Image (cartoon, rainbow, N blue to C red):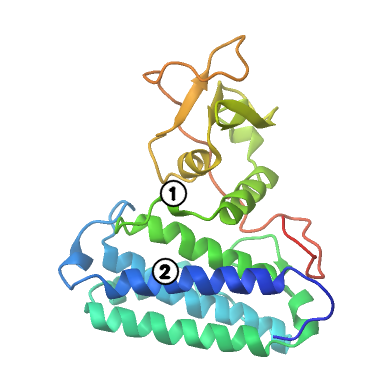
C-alpha cells in the first residue's frame, strides 16, 4: 500500500489484519454442528453470519475496484442478490466456510496493498447514500467484522472490542444520529463511576449512562442494555436503579458513512 506522509491508513490496515485474524481463528474453531446454531441475529444461524461476512468481502473489493478503475462498481448487484447469496452459502460445511473467508481475506489484503495512492481519495458508494472516499472502506470492513464476531455468539463479546474500535464507532454513530427518530435525549459515558463525555440534544426521551463498550453494544442492538442505566431527573451523572426499563435504542447507522468525510486520508480518524 502506497501513501505519502502520515495518514490513518497503516493503523486501519493493522486493525483490519487483527480483527480478520480473530475471525479466522473463530471460524476454525467451529464444527458443522456449531454453524447450525442460532446467532444473535434474528433468523440467522452462525452459518448465515459467516456467509454474509464472506460475501461482504467481495462487496468491499467491488468498492476498491471502483476506486482503482474509476468505473462505477456497485457493492452488491441488488438487495435480493445479496440475500440469495447469504442463504445459499449458509449451509456450507465448516471447512468450506473457513476456506471462503481465508480466500476473501487474502484477496482483500492484496487489493488494499496494491491500491494506488490517489485512489484512496476516490468517491465510492455503498447500497445507501452518502458516497464516501475509498479510505473509509477500511473503516467499514473493520466494522463489519467487529460487530459480526459478536453476532456469532462464539466467545467474542463487546468487552473484547478494542478501545479504538469502540471510540471510532461511537464517533460515527454520533455524526449520523437520527435526531428525529431519537429515543433518548442524552447519553452519558461513564468511566470508574464518573462521567467522561456527554451527548446532549439527541431528541426526545430519557437520559442513559454507561461505559463506552456497553453503550455501543446497546445502541447497535448487540445487548439488551447490560451496563446501561437510566439517569434520574436532576442527577445528570449517576445512573438510576438497575431495574428501570430502558427505551428501545434509536435506529443505528442510518447512513453507512458520515456525510462530510475528508477526501484525503486524514492523519487520524476519529
Spot the residue most to the top.
Answer: 234
Spot the residue most to the front.
Answer: 192
Task: Please tell me which residue lies in front, 23 or 131.
Answer: 23
Q: Position of residue 114 (x, y in %)?
A: 66, 90
Quadrant, the C terminus: bottom right
Looking at the image, residue 262 lies above or below residue 179 = below
Q: Which residue is mark 2?
A: 22
Please give left or right for residue 61 compared with residue 71 in the image: left
Looking at the image, residue 66 lies above or below residue 11 = below
Residue 109 in which image quadrant: bottom right
Q: Position of residue 128 (x, y in %)?
A: 60, 61
SS type, badge 1 = helix
Q: Is residue 125 visible?
A: no
Spot the residue most to the right.
Answer: 5
Please give left or right for residue 181 compared with residue 34 in the image: right
Q: Earlier in the sequence, mark 2 or mark 1?
A: 2
Please give left or right for residue 129 compared with residue 46 in the image: right
As drawn, the label of residue 158 is 1
Density class for disc 2 (Cα within 10 Å; few <14, some 14-19, many ≥20) is: some
SS type, badge 2 = helix
Q: Is residue 198 visible?
A: yes
Q: Position of residue 74 (x, y in %)?
A: 59, 77
C-alpha distance separating marks 2 and 1: 14 Å
Please give left or right for residue 185 compared with residue 28 in the image: right
Amino acid at each position: 500500500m502506497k501513501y505519502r506522509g502520515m495518514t490513518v491508513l497503516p493503523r486501519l490496515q493493522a486493525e483490519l489484519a487483527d480483527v480478520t485474524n480473530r475471525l479466522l481463528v473463530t471460524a476454525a474453531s467451529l464444527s458443522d454442528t456449531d454453524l447450525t446454531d442460532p446467532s444473535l441475529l434474528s433468523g440467522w444461524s452462525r452459518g448465515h453470519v459467516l456467509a454474509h461476512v464472506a460475501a461482504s468481502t467481495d462487496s468491499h473489493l467491488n468498492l476498491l475496484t471502483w476506486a482503482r478503475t474509476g468505473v462505477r462498481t456497485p457493492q452488491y448487484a441488488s438487495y435480493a442478490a445479496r440475500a440469495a447469496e447469504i442463504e445459499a452459502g449458509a449451509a456450507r460445511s465448516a471447512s468450506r466456510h473457513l476456506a471462503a473467508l481465508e480466500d476473501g481475506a487474502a484477496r482483500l489484503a492484496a487489493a488494499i496493498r496494491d491500491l494506488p495512492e490517489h485512489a484512496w481519495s476516490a468517491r465510492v458508494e455503498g447500497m445507501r447514500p452518502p458516497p464516501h472516499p475509498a479510505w473509509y472502506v477500511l473503516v467499514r470492513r473493520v466494522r463489519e467484522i467487529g460487530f459480526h464476531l459478536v453476532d456469532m455468539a462464539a466467545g467474542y463479546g463487546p468487552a473484547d472490542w478494542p478501545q479504538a474500535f469502540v471510540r471510532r464507532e461511537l464517533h460515527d454513530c454520533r455524526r449520523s444520529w437520527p435526531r428525529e427518530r431519537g429515543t433518548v435525549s442524552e447519553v452519558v459515558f461513564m468511566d470508574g463511576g464518573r462521567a467522561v463525555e456527554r451527548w446532549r440534544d439527541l431528541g426526545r426521551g430519557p437520559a442513559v449512562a454507561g461505559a463506552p463498550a456497553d453503550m455501543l453494544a446497546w445502541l447497535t442492538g448487540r445487548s439488551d442494555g447490560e451496563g446501561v442505566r437510566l439517569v434520574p431527573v436532576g442527577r445528570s451523572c449517576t445512573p438510576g436503579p438497575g431495574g428501570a426499563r430502558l427505551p428501545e435504542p434509536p435506529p443505528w447507522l442510518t447512513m453507512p458513512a458520515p456525510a462530510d468525510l475528508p477526501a484525503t486520508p486524514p492523519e487520524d480518524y476519529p
